[in-house]
Amino acid sequence: MAKHSTPISSRDGALKSPWQAGINPAHHTEKHAPGKVYDVVIIGAGITGLTAALLLQKAGKECLVVEAETPGFGTTGGTSAHINTFADTTYAEAQSAFGREGAKLFADAVNEGFALIKENINTYKIACDFEFKKGYVYAEDPEQVKQLDELCKGMLDVGLDCNYNEDIPVPVPHQAAVVMEKQAQFQPLKYLQGLEKAYLQAGGALLTHTRIESVKIENKIHLAKAGEQTFKAVKVIYATHVPPGITIFSFRCAPYRSYVLGVKLKDDNYPDALIYDLQEPYHYFRTHTIDNQKYLIVGGNDHKTGHDDPEKQFADLEKYVRKYYKVAEVGYKWSSQYYIPVDGFPYIGHIDGIYCATGFNGNGMMLGSISAKILADLILGKKSKYEKVFSPGRIKPVDGFSEFIKENADVAYHFVADRFGIHKSDSLKRLQPGTGKVVEIDGEKIAAYKDETGEIHALNPVCTHAGCIINWNGQEKSWDCPCHGARFDIDGKVLTGPATKDLLKINADEN
Ligand SMILES: Cc1cc2nc3c(=O)[nH]c(=O)nc-3n(C[C@H](O)[C@H](O)[C@H](O)COP(=O)(O)OP(=O)(O)OC[C@H]3O[C@@H](n4cnc5c(N)ncnc54)[C@H](O)[C@@H]3O)c2cc1C
């Protein structure tokens, strides 16, 4: 793995993405006036939150961004940073679910998000390795050829370019391919740092290492609570993927883990394009130069969070790339989390007094950016043509919601003890240093991690969000919840919402 002598920002996993190096976490200005009623409090400093904050601050609103860790800690620090004119929900799928007009609006949103990134780079002179590239999608069998035809027709139907092309710039046998001009790539954390700098220069306030646990409304003022602290605002945006707590989004967005490798090749066979296959889940290839070294960025092997073995996903992905390329070294490997919306479109807008944006699938660079613009427009009292089609209000309460909570609450109810003679347990003796497992001791489940010194870090394995039992992720050294994707570190600290409370620690010293 790559060694870092430069400063490195933190991320919600143990593995480092290549974007983190050179991003100095000490740079963040803690600027906030206690007691003040802000125009807007923005929760979360990823691409969505910081783009929204910059737009609003520039439009004359007084904003406070509150980030649980540091900017880029979430998926923006673990993305693969393709900027596309197409999306995981194809325009053909969009048309069949939302009609021609819906598909056209979706295309406009994706493309406006793309344009906004480019505009910010130009306006704020953000050096972030932005480059236009051609994009290719290829089919490997007759079924995929049909899918490719539909994908291309869908693009043409919404007025976008898509041309058939015999060759693709990856050495994978294929039956058909299309090419799209003017796709792009960039270094997401350098871009984010540029947004942050512009926002702070415009007078915006930013508070890091502060996790918002709840927001309530009193006398038309929003009170966002983080421990003993309360932040006041006229409007609040949750730019945290799904908002914390149990909301209808818990049932309308599914969390997925996705895997990426940064590979050094023995030859110079790096593709100068963005390339995607049509497998399920799909793979993609692109090239990024980091510290004068080219890396082949290869991604895929997505699965629902907490439902598969991350080690196996990395191994399969590496096997896949080795099949086609002469690999000298895997310089980077990392994984991150995205959210699939149940009907294919993101949820952007106003619900229950709060503004939120989620369900971006693997397209959050464009959809996060356009969400920021849509939310800023709504907060500024402007009309947005996207308001209706992406409205979170299109969600209906789900039958069985209360049943689901009850079932899982039972799991939590059974967990009563908080101290065990856990060192007596054979299963813990067998646990290898550096690994974790949910084990059963005296009829009770414990999430146990044995560190390199042999010390056990024992936790209540009941997720503090909705009461599901967490699973060990040995690659990112985290406990991942298979229900709604909440994630915790080895000491139970929340890494990823929608949980806001840490896991309960169990005293492991008892004999
Ligand atoms: C492996 C992978 C590859 C991807 N590749 C692409 C791609 O090539 N192109 C593309 O367009 N999209 C891609 N995506 C999707 C895209 O990266 C995400 O949709 C996007 O980064 C989401 O940005 P965000 O700002 O909404 O969320 P995040 O970047 O996750 O930011 C949310 C922030 O909120 C903070 N937070 C959470 N809860 C709280 C709280 N309660 N209080 C305070 N702060 C809180 C978090 O710490 C975090 O920093 C990819 C996703 C994955 C997983």
Image (cartoon, helix red, strand yellow):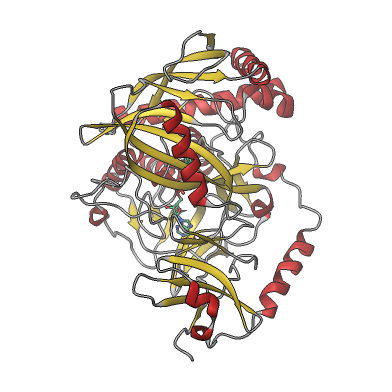
Q: Position of residue 189 (x, y in %)?
A: 33, 42
Q: In the picture, residue 485 is in which quadrant?
A: bottom right
Which residue is nearer to you in this view: 410 or 359? 410
- Residue 92 visible, this orientation: yes
Q: Nearer the viewer, residue 253 or 101?
A: 253
Tally of numbered discs:
0
Res. 376 visible in picture: no
Q: Is residue 268 left or right of residue 46?
A: left
Q: Residue furthest left?
A: 5
Answer left or right for 367 relative to 67.
right
Q: Is residue 33 above or below residue 45?
A: below
Q: Position of residue 127 (x, y in %)?
A: 25, 33
Q: Nearer the viewer, residue 335 or 117?
A: 335
Residue beneath the point at 38% across and 76% down: 454
Quadrant hosting residue 98? top right
Q: Quadrant of residue 325?
A: top left
> Is residue 289 found left or right of 79 in the rendered image?
left
x, y percent for residue 429? 48, 77
Where does the image place residue 347, in percent across and percent down from the top left? 61, 42
Report the residue that reaches farthest toward the right.
399
